[in-house]
Amino acid sequence: MNEELGRIALAGLLHDIGKFGQRAGEMVMGKRDHASIGEKFVNTYIPKAWQAASAPVAWHHGDPEGLGHEVFPVLVLRVADRLSAGEREQTEEEHGRFPPQMVSPFASLVRPHGEPPKTWLPLEPLTLEEAHLFPQEIPYAESEWRANYSRLWQEFCSQVEKLKVLHETHPNLEAYLLCLLDLLLRYCWCVPSAFYYDVPDVSLYDHLRTTAAI
């Protein structure tokens, strides 16, 4: 694999990972913005050989001037992010009605218009357990979803840290990307990519992988 392309793909997979940490209550020096949380995640859990990916993660929504040779990957990621975000449907409805859970994407196939669907994906790792696979008719209370996000985030970070240890001594970027993609699927399949300004029916996993692919 071309090293530069691999690093940009890695940045694509991680560019919005701070949104996951944000919902788990993470903060960086008193700030809750997802770019700062994402940069901290990269610097903590990604092997040092590939931590250059932190520049696009931190700056894909900001001004990249002054980054020198890192400007190009930031600009590439910014375009890819916007193209990937085109899959989210803007709505003028009051977004406070949606809890920070992902609306089941199948609901719109049955009822494309009218009232928002009343089923939400559980905030659980993707497993074959019935309770982890099927949507709920009743969303979590705030205390429940906050606790579930915190637990999911901690489990995800623990798994990524194990991956870091392995690749610090035996680095293989292509294998690392595949393993990271699997972990993102397991833990981010149920995390909405956006819920402040969009109908939350697209997972963070899908947004990250399509950004990396572009």
Image (cartoon, rainbow, N blue to C red):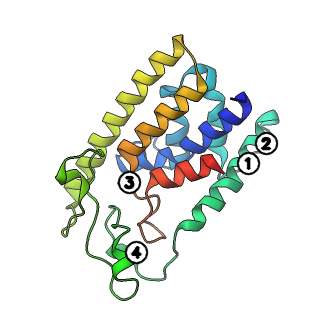
The first of marks 2 and 3 along the sequence is 2
User: Image point 29% across, 44% down: which residue?
Assistant: 125
Does residue 163 appear to the left or right of 153 in the view shown?
right
Q: Distance between the Cα atoms at labels 2 and 1?
A: 6 Å
Q: Which residue is mark 1?
A: 76
Tell how many labels. Answer: 4
Badge 3 amino acid: Val
Q: Residue furthest top?
A: 169
Label 3 – label 1 distance at C-alpha:
25 Å
Callouts 3 and 1 close, C-beta under 8 Å: no
Q: Which mark is residue 72?
A: 2
Q: Quadrant of residue 137 in the image?
A: bottom left
What amino acid is at disc 1?
Answer: Val
On the picture, is 193 further left or further right than 77? left
Q: Position of residue 98 (x, y in %)?
A: 34, 71
> Which of 27/1 is in front?
1
In the figure, residue 145 lies in which quadrant?
bottom left
The amino acid pointed to by label 4 is: His
Please state the horizontal and vertical placement of residue 101, each as a whole percent of the image.
32, 61
The structure residue drawn at horizontal position 30% and vertical position 46%, both measured from the top left corner, is: 126
Callout 2 secondary element: helix
Q: Is residue 207 visible?
A: yes
Nearer to us: label 4 or label 1: 1
Q: Secondary structure at mark 1?
A: helix
- Residue at the disc numbered 4: 95
The residue depicted at 67 percent of the width and 38 percent of the height is 8
Task: Name the residue type under label 2.
Answer: Phe
Which residue lies under the disc numbered 3?
A: 191
Do labels 2 and 1 touch, CB within 8 Å? Answer: yes
The span from disc 2 to disc 3 (Cα, nearest Å) is 29 Å
